[in-house]
Image (cartoon, rainbow, N blue to C red):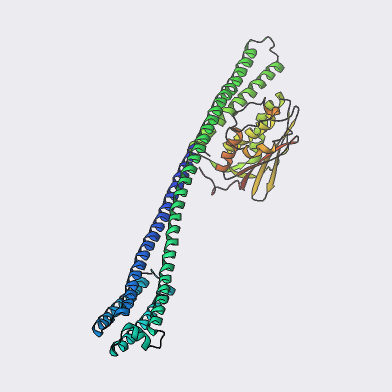
Amino acid sequence: MKIGTLLGIGIVAIIGLMISATVYSSYLNSKAQNIIENSTSRIFDVLTIQRDTEELFSAIDGLEIIQNQEKLDEAKENIKFLHDRALNTIRVGRERQIFSESDTASANETLNKVSAISVRIISLKEEAIDQSVSQDESNQLFNGVSRLDNEFNTLRNVRFEMLGVVNDVIIRSDEEFRAAMDLVQTAQKVTWAVVVVSLVLALLLAFFLIRSAKKIYDLKNEFINIIAHDLRNPVTAIIGYLDIITTGKDKSAAKLNENLQAVEVSAQKLRNQINNLLEVGRTEAGHVKLMMEPVLAIDVIKESVIRAKAFAETSGMKINDEKAVGENVYVLADRSKLSDILDNLISNAIKYNREKGTVTVSTQDAGEMFSISVADTGHGIPEDQKQKIFKKYSRLERNEEKSVRGTGLGLYTVKLSMDLMKGSVAFKSKENEGTTFTVSLKKTNKSDTENMIE
């Protein structure tokens, strides 16, 4: 994955995380604010009910000292007003969802008790006033133990019931308020946690980018050094052999042929190196134009084998293409690219082979697909390096292959080219036994022009 892509993903992830945290914190704060407002409103309304009911209880308590009918009538009107006001306050509280259904039922039940007690007390007071007796005499009048005192005692108990209802609502409101404060604290913790995580992610991203940039810088330097070496060596070899041919004392045909073969090997290496560089550049830039056409696969195979034989012989290797068959098999491909792919695979099989090893080129006809395999008898690919074999600049990191120089672009180019031609490339390898690379392309007819693509 490219550094720019990683940087973009990292920045988007950090921004997304911070935005999510901000939204979530805002949601928690908004929810807490609503709870606090509702709790505050509930407490205010509860206190209003407490005030109204206390005024009602106080008005009923005042009946105890009233001694005439006129004052009693005024008290009756006031008690009725206060009772209705308390009922209305409870109704409004229920409508605003300040009180639960059970709270409302308990409060109404208590007010009904208060109403019934006030009616009994007023009735007793009227009876006492009609008989024109004092409070003490009225107590004696009502069976020794004052019925009025009993009613007032009952009223006090009912008052405690009402206080209990009010306190229950206040306690729940307080619990909700505390829960709201917990939400606020949670929002603050989430915000701080996200800030810390974002900073950590930013530091990790910066560390990764710096390390990746250093790695790319090192790869670039290594790549330049390898290119300079690999381009200079074949040119130097070609010049040297040509100089031997033109100025050497041994002018025999055998020596001349030997020197020309060496020139051909060096030229082939130079050609492959330049092709790889150009291929990668054109492909990554999207400037590659394919000429997809029916290609006789065996012809391309034979040509690549012939080109590689001189290199193989000077390296002490043997190329076996006896298993490459398919005289009349055509594949849909770009001939030039298929040729470069096979040159690359055979060249690698020679370079990474054992001393006096063998390179085997074979074919497999598998229904709609035709496969070409290049196998070596080398040291194989270690398990921990198989996943990066087709990556750009990837090279084997093992003592046996350290002497083999290269840019790490060969197999990367093969993979790019096969993808462009809608084919596939795969490999299997076993350490100390060798490696086999297989490319597969769709078969076609020699006269097939429908699938030709330029």
The image shows residue 16, relative to residue 144, as above or below, that is above
Q: Please state which of residues 62 and 408 is positioned toward the viewer in this rendering.
A: 62
Up the image or down, 24 lies above or below 53; here it is above
Q: Nearer the viewer, residue 172 or 430?
A: 172
Instruction: Indicate whether 195 appears above or below 24.
Output: above
Q: Farthest residue in the left direction?
A: 70
Looking at the picture, tell me which residue is in the foreground, 61 or 339: 61
Q: Position of residue 342 (x, y in %)?
A: 63, 35
Residue plotted at (46% across, 55% down)? 182
Q: Residue at x 38, y 57 (%)?
A: 33
Q: Nearer the viewer, residue 84 or 429?
A: 84
Residue 328: where, in percent of width, then height?
66, 44
- Residue 181: where, in percent of width, then height? 43, 55
Residue 243 at x, y percent in the picture: 62, 13
Looking at the image, residue 43 sits to the left or right of residue 289; the answer is left
Q: Quadrant of residue 124?
A: bottom left
Above or below, comparing residue 282 to residue 235 in the picture: below
How many numbered markers are drawn? 0
* Image quadrant in which you'd find residue 70: bottom left
Q: Is residue 189 visible?
A: yes
- The answer to whether residue 2 is visible is no
